[in-house]
Image (cartoon, rainbow, N blue to C red):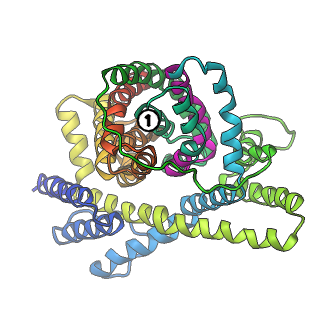
Amino acid sequence: MMFIGPILSLIFIAIVAKLLLSKVYPHAVLLIAGLLMMGLALVLQFNMPKLDNPTGLGGFDLFRYIKESFSSINAGVGLMIMSIGGFVAYTHKIGASNALVQLAMRPLRIFKNHPHLTAVFVIPIGQILFICIPSAAGLSLLLMASIFPILLNLGVSRISAASVITACTAFGIGPASAITASASSIAEIPTINYFIDEQLMLIIPLNLTLMIVYYFTNRYFDKKGGEEIIETEFSKEDTHEAPPHYAIIPVLPLVLLIVFSDLFSFFESPIVLDTTTAMIISLFAAMVFELIRLKSFTAVLKSLKTFWDGMGEIFKTVVTLIIAADIFAKGLIALGFVDGLVSLSEGAGLGYIGITVVLALMIYLASMMMGSGNAAFFAFGPLVPKIAGNLGVSSTSILLPMNLAASMGRTVSPVAGVIIATAEIAGVTPLQIVKRNLIPLSAGLIVLLIAHFL
């Protein structure tokens, strides 16, 4: 009887993976699968996840889980992610994101006589930009509009240029990242602490690894030649022009979170900001910038609609996905998947390191199949506290490699939005970019796991 739950869990995971690969709406797939698993657990009289306010009837309780998930997520990490989405939309609308990209790319002129070296230096600069502009597709399109033509003029091939641009989004880190927000919420630590204490130290060797491996990989494939190029008319993305000093706006939330955090003691009386508050403060600072530039109070007030639209877009795409994934995770817990995974690892002698490697590889492959690092992480991240508790380790020690593996897996997925959008503009196929990305990102995954356990 004890093996029935985990076996059923694996069957559901296989079915869900197949449906997601077939591009069936992921929100519905995860939600329905989660409800079905909890329904089976209820029928089989397994231990159900804790419910704060049960209805008194098991069948109704299944839907009560959805209600409580909406309440808890929207009040916490959901609001944080929506505020991030609204702020990113606003900075893009007023041209601040583009101003930051233009400023950040100026140092590349130093390497103008070394095209492949220039290409790999896009990666760390782009990674810094990704911390402030946490939209993989959004940042890649900005880079395609700004740095892609420059790389082509320097002699970098279309595929090499496109591959390093997508590599800039390989690590979902920083307080503005949806995965970071979710991971820090699961680990119950402040987002800025998770970013500085946990993520930053791993990003340095990972970026160096990508730069080195991309340099040799792209040089090899470019010399080999024979890559198919699709005829396309490259056109710049429709971006708004903004003064150079607008580049400070996307960075402002990060500056506020670092300065006003418990990591430093800059003030006698502690002042600590959370991510949502920092985003709202930065939004009003951006509106002041716009008021000075446009000298029209009415136009600035009207521009606030972009922020609300951005919040709404993030709610219907990311936050609802987190809720659906939360129900899916509860279904796996109800069927004993977590307990089975821990028992299996202990029986095989894997222990903490072994099960962390298994989870990181699982989420990496899931992200490749789904084309979404968020979907993969949101599905498996909530399982970590129970696993960590059974293994006697901190949740962060398991969440961190899963966090990075999820965003890395998206970068080698031919169905990921960032890969498809970049390939379309570059005039290459998504599989050609994935072929270039696979070796560096696989090397990055190995370095991630080694560095994490050192």
Q: Secondary structure at mark 1?
A: helix
- Indicate the quadrant where residue 346 lies: top left
Picture layout, residue 283 above or below residue 112: below
The spot of residue 133 in percent (x, y) is 61, 47
> Quadrant location of the C terminus?
top left
Residue on which the image places disc 1: 158
| Front residue (pair 152, 258) | 152
Q: In this rendering, does residue 184 appear at all?
A: no
Picture layout, residue 58 above or below residue 132: below
The spot of residue 160 in percent (x, y) is 43, 31
Q: In this rendering, does residue 283 appear at all?
A: yes
Q: Is residue 324 magenta?
A: no
Q: Is residue 140 magenta?
A: yes
At horizontal 69% and vertical 30% (from top left) the residue drawn is 106
> Quadrant location of the N terminus?
bottom left
| Front residue (pair 385, 28) | 28
At horizontal 25% and vertical 66% (from top left) the residue drawn is 33
Give the magenta part as a residue range: 116-141
- 263 horizontally vs 414: left or right: right
- Indicate the quadrant where residue 78 lies: bottom right
- 148 horizontally vs 388: left or right: right
